[in-house]
Image (cartoon, rainbow, N blue to C red):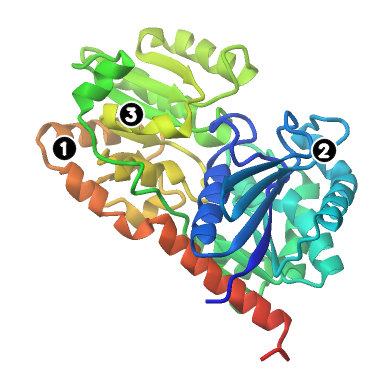
């Protein structure tokens, strides 16, 4: 295997930012974990970001072969909604850094459409293949979400980039189908490379010990939600489901994520919990370090993913890796890995009443010891990050060979 040098772009989000905050979610985990695994295979990866300017134009070495490079931007913190108009300046900053640093690359891999715009310039100027992972598609978020949230500008540029890039890596077959059927992208240009899970850091633990360490009720039913506090995630209908469940049982829903106790998104959900009369059942835990999440997965009876749309849903794999079952709407990777009665349940009826009924089913299965934590973990063993990195490397080589067809 010839070592490759990869320029990886995560322009709007630092891959080591706080998970669950506004611009930091599963994508950050994907960027960090795949870069580290590629580095372990002997490849060199430079991750470029314009987020988190507490480190203006500095280099953080994540692994021997992996560097995280903060690009200094003006103004220092650019809102995501305005970032598109600053991309030319960010590209100039990227170009200046690469010129000074003297490193050359074999390939550019952009994560998200904003990075894709910068990656398009870089690939063209450097004469390199450009691979894109969109992570989410505006057309699907708009079609499947509770309201039209995505600007036309994003949809226009995702469509352009899908046709101008060398290859696209998508996490699910549903996303691939959308690109091929709706945007007329050649089938050979789009490959499904599912994301993964760290089977070493995530493990089955003693739930009583985990609850004691976290100060949680050892006798209560513990449900957890992990993610950003946006309407697309369906938190509101999950809270309505909790309000509809058996009031006599001791039950707590832990909401992990959000932008802090004073953020409008958090205050909105707190107002809803008050309106529903379930303030005593809801705990807002804020953003939790990714390395500490194993304790929360171990402490929970059940992870709930009530989303309208997920490009993948990494938290599903993380929970299952800890032996904790998942109840999820049919989104992202859930439809491929969740087996009703074995490691969780697919929520077919996503109304609050339907969610409540599905949760009650899973909780009865748990109480009857129908689902084994060991079997739950085994059900996703093929999704280790090492497998993802090897599949990604295979696609990199194909992109390079197609870009340079005359090179033996």
For marks 1 and 2, give the CA distance. Answer: 52 Å
Q: Secondary structure at mark 3?
A: helix
Per the image, the residue denoted by label 1 is: 365
Mark 1 surroundings: few (<14), some (14-19) or many (≥20) residues within 10 A: some
| Mark 2 or mark 3, whichever is nearer to me | 2
Horizontal arrangement in the rendering, residue 109 relative to residue 302 (left or right): right
- State the mark number for residue 183: none
Horizontal arrangement in the rendering, residue 240 relative to residue 393 (left or right): left
Residue 269 higher or lower than 153, as above or below: above
For marks 2 and 3, give the CA distance. Answer: 36 Å
Residue that appears at 81% across and 48% down: 153
Q: Secondary structure at mark 2?
A: loop
Name the one closer to the observer, 365 or 91. 91
Report x, y in % for residue 72: 82, 38
Mark 2 surroundings: few (<14), some (14-19) or many (≥20) residues within 10 A: many
Q: Earlier in the sequence, mark 2 or mark 3?
A: 2
Horizontal arrangement in the rendering, residue 217 relative to residue 259 (left or right): left
Can residue 171 be seen by looking at this rendering? no
Mark 3 surroundings: few (<14), some (14-19) or many (≥20) residues within 10 A: many
Q: Residue furthest left?
A: 368
Report x, y in % for residue 359: 28, 32
Per the image, the residue denoted by label 2 is: 72
- State the mark number for residue 295: 3
**Residue 393, picture quadrant:** bottom right
Residue that appears at 90% across and 45% down: 89
């Amino acid at each position: 295997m010839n070592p490759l040098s990869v320029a990886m772009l995560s322009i709007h989000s630092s891959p080591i930012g706080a998970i669950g905050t506004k611009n930091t979610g599963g994508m950050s985990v994907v960027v960090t974990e795949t870069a580290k695994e590629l580095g372990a295979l002997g490849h060199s990866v430079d991750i470029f970001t314009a987020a988190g300017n507490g480190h203006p134009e500095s280099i953080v070495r994540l692994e021997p072969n992996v560097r995280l490079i903060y690009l200094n931007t003006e103004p220092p913190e650019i809102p995501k909604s305005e970032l598109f108009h600053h991309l030319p300046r960010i590209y100039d900053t990227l170009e200046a850094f690469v010129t000074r640093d003297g490193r050359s690359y074999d390939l550019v891999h952009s994560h998200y459409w904003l990075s894709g715009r910068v990656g398009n310039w870089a690939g063209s100027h450097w004469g390199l293949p450009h691979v894109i992972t969109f992570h989410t598609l505006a057309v699907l978020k708009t079609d499947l979400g509770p309201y039209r949230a995505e600007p036309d500008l994003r949809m226009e540029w995702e469509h352009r980039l899908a046709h101008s890039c060398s290859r696209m890596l998508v996490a699910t077959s549903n996303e691939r189908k959308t690109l091929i059927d709706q945007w007329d992208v050649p089938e050979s240009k789009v490959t499904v490379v599912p994301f993964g899970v760290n089977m070493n850091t995530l493990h089955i633990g003693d739930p009583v010990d985990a609850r004691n360490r976290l100060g949680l009720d050892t006798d209560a039913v513990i449900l957890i939600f992990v993610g950003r506090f946006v309407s697309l995630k369906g938190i509101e209908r999950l809270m309505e489901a909790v309000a509809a469940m058996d009031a006599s049982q001791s039950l707590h829903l832990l909401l992990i994520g959000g932008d802090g106790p004073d953020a409008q998104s958090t205050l909105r959900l707190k107002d809803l919990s008050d309106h529903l009369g379930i303030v005593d059942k809801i705990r807002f835990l804020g953003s939790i370090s990714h390395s500490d999440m194993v304790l929360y997965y171990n402490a929970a009876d059940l992870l709930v993913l009530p989303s309208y749309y997920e490009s993948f849903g990494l938290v599903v794999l993380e929970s299952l890796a800890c032996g904790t079952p998942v109840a999820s709407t049919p989104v992202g990777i859930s439809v491929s890995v969740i087996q009703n009665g074995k490691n969780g349940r697919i929520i077919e009826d996503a109304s609050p009443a339907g969610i409540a009924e599905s949760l009650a089913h899973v909780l009865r299965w748990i109480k009857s010891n129908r689902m084994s934590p060991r079997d739950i973990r085994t059900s996703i063993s093929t999704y280790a990050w090492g497998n993802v990195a090897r599949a990604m490397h295979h696609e990199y080589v194909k992109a390079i060979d197609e870009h340079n067809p005359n090179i033996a």
